[in-house]
Structure formats: C-alpha cells, structure tokens
Amino acid sequence: MDLKSLRAFKKVYETGSISRAADVLYITQPGLSKAIGRLEAECGHQLFERTPKGVVPTVYARALYSQVDQLLTLMTEIEADALNMERSRKLTVASTIGVLLYVGMAFASGFEEAFPEIELFVEEGSDKRVEEWLSSGSVEIGFLAGPVDRARYDAWPFSRHRHVLDVSEDDPLADREFVEHRDLDGRVVALLSRDYRPYENNVRWLAEAGSVPRQLIEVVEGFTGSQLVASGKAVSITTDYSSQMRAAQGVVAVPFKNPEHSYDVYLVKRRGVLLSSDAEAFRVFALDWIAAHHEELFSSPTAVF
C-alpha cells in the first residue's frame, strides 16, 4: 500500500468519477485505473463498481475511506522517517590535534553542503589514539602526523607546517632569524607529549644535532607551552600556525632553519582495506578542498607546504 494509490483512491471516492479524479490529480485515466487496481489487489477486495453515471464505492471502500486520512498521515510519516534515516548516515573521522584549528569550520561545512546525507563527526585525539582507532576499525579514515608507516597505512599528504620555537622576547634567541636544534642544548624545552608524533621527531632532531636539553617538559596542548615561555621558565617547540593562533604577549616565534623540520599531516587509511563509499567521498573531498584553499591557508612566511 503506497501513498500514490491511497491518494488516487480518496480522490476517486470523493469525485465519484475516474475521469474527474484523473483531471484533479493530473494523471491519465489508465494510470489512475492501474493505481486503483493495485490497491484492490493488495486489499483483496473490489473497491468500486462501474456504472453509467460513474463509479460506486463498495462496502469495503466505504470502510477504507473512513480511515484513509489516518493511513495517509501514517504513510507520509513512514516515508519521511525512512528519508531521514537515509540522510543520517554517520561518518566518523579521526584526527590528530590541531587540524580543525587551521582548516576551520569552512572545511566541515563544505563537506556537509556537498554531502547533506552524511553526518560528519571528527574525533580528535593524540596520534597514538588515532592509530588505535584505525587499527581497531572503529574509524575508517583519519588525519595522522608523519612520518607514516607505509606498511600499515595508505597515506596522502594533507598539510605541512614549519616548526618554530616560542621564546620570551628578552631571550637571546628572540633576535635570531632562525634557530636550530643545537641551540637548545642545556635549555628547558616544552613540547607536545610523546603521544604525539612531533615529540618523537623533535627528540630525534635534538639527538642528531648533539643537543641535550636540561629538561623536556611534555604538554598536552600548546597553550601550556606558551604560558611556560611567557613566564620565562622554558622555550617551546610548536608550529607556525599554532604559535600565531595563540599569539601570547611577550612571546616571539622563531622558525627552525631546516624547512624539513616540519609538522606533516597525512590523510590515512589502513593498507589493504577498502573504504566505504562515504569514507571515500570524504577522502576525495578533503584532498580537493585543501588543494583549493592552499593559498589562504599556507600564506605564512614560514609555511613550507
């Protein structure tokens, strides 16, 4: 029993004529007759008797008409609910910290406009957590800081930001055009905790430079690092975009000299696992979107993307 057949039945009942009902519904008489025939087949009863003066409803038709408005309301609600269910497909994307900060709400809004039937959720966490979510299969796709294990993941470059050193404005390094990891020998250095890939990268670069900080302070978000710098207790390794967004008073950001000392983010999925159509739609959208907005996002003098 469908809405079209029920509406056809109601109009034929009220007009007492196949031809008049067809005119009102803007369909052909044969088409209307077929709709009534389908409904009769579903009900198992004849609904109308044809006479020279038109059609006469049967007892079953009179009983059906007494309930037809309720049936139409119910069928309309069922179809609306089914459509809402179809349009409320949910896609969860994992993300290392900070990605949404520099792409902004325009990124998520753009995806929702392009795919209104997909409800997007971005689950943000450390790189360690993102890998756990991907490994467990709880998410299909995510943003992960590099370097990426290519044996485990298929990866597409998404963004790249230069590492900078936040120092207090009266620090001798504040007047430098660039800094190097060797400049941090004997210093108190704040950086994101070891659950994040930049920790591993910077510890490696410090070791390669032969630099041994007096103390490494692991922080879970950049604001803490800025406060340590502002208080004169530490210098902080961060990224150009993160430093610019915080813009703490009395804190100066000095880029690292080597442009390869960067914070690289990749869009990744598990290797050998096919993405669902929704996740694949997100992958294509994300890469196209970042390419289209390259100039506005990476216009910083220290940008290396």
Image (tube, rainbow, N blue to C red):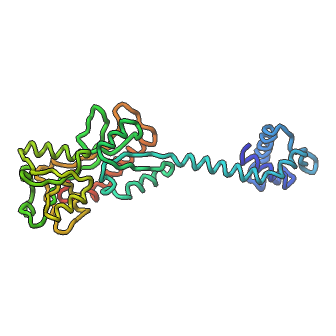
Query: Quarter-wise, where is residue 60 in the image?
Result: top right
Q: Residue at x 12, y 49 (%)?
A: 258
Query: Quarter-wise, where is residue 235 in the image?
Result: bottom left
Relative image position of residue 166 (x, y in whole percent): 16, 59
Relative image position of residue 129 (x, y in whole percent): 33, 43
Q: Residue at x 12, y 54 (%)?
A: 188
Q: Residue furthest right?
A: 52
Of 129 and 289, the residue lying toward us: 129
Location of residue 113 with respect to 282 vertically, above or below: below
Question: In the rendered image, is residue 304 in sight?
Answer: no
Instruction: Name the side, left or right, on which 140 lies relative to 1.
Output: left
Relative image position of residue 269 (x, y in whole percent): 35, 38
Relative image position of residue 145 (x, y in whole percent): 26, 45
Instruction: Name the side, left or right, on which 304 lies relative to 60.
Output: left
- Give the mark count: 0
Location of residue 84 with respect to 175 vertically, above or below: above
Q: Residue at x 24, y 57 (%)?
A: 222
Of 92 and 236, the residue lying toward us: 236
Instruction: Name the side, left or right, on which 12 lies relative to 286.
Output: right
Instruction: Name the side, left or right, on which 200 lies relative to 29.
Output: left
| On-image quarter of the N terminus | top right
Location of residue 245 with respect to 269 vertically, above or below: below
Question: In the rendered image, is residue 237 in sight?
Answer: yes
